[in-house]
Image (cartoon, helix red, strand yellow):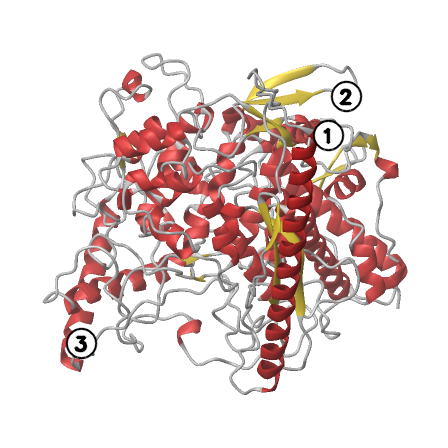
Amino acid sequence: MERPGTSSERTPLVQPTYVFESSITRRYRKRLKNCQCAICVTILVLLSIILLVTVSYNLAEDFNGDDFDNDTILPIVIPVANGSKLNMVGIGNLKSSGNRTVYNLTSIEPNLLPIMNKKWPLEETPTAPWPTTPPAADISAAVSRGNAALAAQQRAEAARTALGRNTPAHRAQRAAATAVDVKPMADAAYAAEEATKVLVNGSPHRGGSIGRGPATNGHFQEPPYCRDTPGCPASKFRSQDGSCNNLANPLRWGVSRTPFRRVLPADYGDGISSPRRGVNGSALPSARDISVTVHRPSYAHDISFTVMLAVWGQFIDHDITATALSKGENGTSLSCCDPSQPPHPACFPVPLDAEDPFYQDYHVTCMEFVRSAPAPTCHFGPREQMNQATAYLDASTVYGCSSSRAAQLRTFSGGLLRMLVVEGRELLPQSMDPNDGCNTDEMNAKGRYCFETGDDRANENLHLTTMHLVWARQHNRIANILSTLNPSWDDERLYQESRKIVGAQMQHISYNEFLPLVLGNDVMWALNLSLLPTGHSNSYSPRVDASMANHFSAAVFRFAHTLLPGLIHSFDADTGSVDYIHLHEMLFNPYMLYRETGARKSVYSAMNTPVHGVDPHVTEELSNHLFERPTTNSSLPAHPCGLDLVSLNIQRGRDHGLPPYPAWREHCGFQRPKTFGELKGVLNEVSWQRISTIYSHVDDIDLYTGALAEEPNGRLLGPTLTCLIADQFLRIKVGDRFWYETEDESSGFTIEQLTEIRKTTLASVICANEQLLAQAQPRVMELVGETNPLVACTELPQPVWDPWKE
């Protein structure tokens, strides 16, 4: 799917060449051409018939055979010439019962053909096991050393001083929102990691992954997913933490507080846990140097999409990913740039050049960065990180990923969520935590606090907080309607039914509005990501692990950071005036919502501000001023420096041991580049020059930087990002037993209910829950235009709720 560019092409001023032929010559050439075309068409038809007969015969054999994998998506590609593109036909989700889903005819860009020739979902490369199991005595000694290392770390933590509350680094760590109960799990994982180093001490390993060792077998404190699998009670509703979605892996696949899914073996500097290094063993260039060199700010807007695209992307990202950070004693934030502090193994600060074009003015040469918390893997071996969120798109960002968080947000009356009522308007309940990185003494003195939702990152920016508010109102609106329709339903039934509907609507918006813009309708269609217009779906496969991929969370889905402009429009519908606010001033600043028109102005802002294109360029609002706040200290400039989000993203990928960019090209079916020259034409010209200058080797390129630098060829994303995002969202869809289109009568919707849910749009949800909003474009992630005009909110389709009446 091609999309409009940022400028229109014009006819080149080239003198045409004129060739004159006689009429006899023209007639002869025409007859010859017609004859050649007829022969070619005949041959193509015969070949197609032969191929189709062969495929049909093979499929018939597969259906009757014993070796057919019922849950593997097997793309069978039939290319048919169509100008510069190829039409693709594929067969997917073949079931032994004879049911099958056929990928419909679609048009695919030639540069995406290698992706289409892969099996979907993409196959993982498993981490190789250790060749031998160490003796029990060696394991016992290693465990003792691991526990001793943990005790030393805890002593160092007790002697350390936490980060200052009002620093950008503190707000950054609070934004990651690491739960209190993660710390004991991370400590146990660290001890197992240190024990692993003892076990492999005689076999030095540089780079890559040491491989999967023997099971830890209770030598360290282990979470439930390391133990025997329990049975799951039958339920029509999802669990709060994602457990028992996949009945064969009820405590591991897609469940909150479990390790990320590792698609390619980790690439750690020591093969176990140290951050990735260059192929020659030397340190990689500073993440900040790469940010300054490759990711310089650009001010070109995209004429197609609005900031609402990025807002929705962040909203659902927080629904499916939440990386836990390492913490100090009692869950305090770690300080890593203070040389007077005892060293901590979780510190991995970003070095800054003394002549950095921005930070030199503040005499700052170190940017705070704390490594992600390790997660217990139940085995000795390389480090893995923890996802605190459920991997399923289940509205957990609204309700929370634990029973305790869900209970904290409920009224336990009428199925409703708690709300704060201010002058007749419903706002989110208040967060009274003075250390949440958002609350300020000045605002608290006025009785204004930040807000509490299912996700601790909700206050990160005003647009995100507003989206949380809209969906909390949506839940209560639906609960009140269902209560009227079914007076006999108790609080629990009303809550769960409303939660189920909200989750379905979020899934529908994500796959009907968001993903087609990100991936393109052609990729959606070809990979069976498109939603059904009618009826139920049988796409669920219990063999598909929907767990969140490590690379998706740490690098790939962070592409939306490049979309954000430095200035956000603030539109006043009453006066027609437009003001502007710097992006960094909206971070951890949700207080506008206390104003009567605050939510309306926030929504209008997101619906009317154009985004930047997806490319390596990031606004300096994020690369210099992230989480910045003014200071009254006269010894510093009025606005002290913030953090660099690009540097943090690159550093996070190295922290997680993500393999370099070329490995992901190969994973997606492209030829793995061996030299920088082989990337010419793959990356945009300017980025290619900068990347080949700052990196010493092509296999040093970070995934985040390389993937963003790819030529999109008229699409929103380049091929590698398209591939990796499509794979994760395909898994979320076909690996979710509670997917809203499911044909399973025990957990799904009726056909009549599905018909109503399919009327959902993000515009209609916003209009239904922000009473002061009079107009909206039907597709709020796209700018207003001839095919997307502003319409009255009353004209937008809304679900009819009668099918839920018992």
**Residue visible at 58% across and 70% down?**
245
Q: Secondary structure at mark 3?
A: helix
Q: Circle 3 is placed at which residue position?
A: 140
Q: The disc labelled 3 sits on which kind of residue? A: Ser
Residue 315 got which mark? Answer: none
Q: Are marks 1 and 3 in contact (CB under 8 Å)?
A: no
Give neighbour class at mark 2: few <14, some 14-19, many 20+ (Cα, 10 Å): some
Q: Which kind of residue does numbered mark 2 sit on?
A: Ala
Q: Name the residue located 70 percent from the left edge and 28 percent from the top edge.
A: 604
Q: Of helix, strand and loop, which one carries label 1?
A: helix
Disc assigned to residue 573: 2
Residue 103 location in percent, x, y?
65, 62
Question: Badges 2 and 1: C-beta atoms under 8 Å apart?
Answer: yes
Per the image, the residue denoted by label 1 is 600
Q: CA distance from mark 1 to mark 3?
A: 62 Å
The residue that appears at 38% across and 38% down in the rendered structure is 705
Contact between labelled residues 2 and 3, with CB atoms less than 8 Å apart? no
Which of the pair 244/429 is nearer the observer?
A: 244
Query: In terms of depth relative to the viewer, which is nearer, 242 or 286?
Result: 286
Quadrant in the rendering for residue 750: bottom right
Task: Tell me which numbered mark, 2 or 1, is placed earlier along the sequence.
Answer: 2
Which of the pair 661/545 is nearer the observer?
661
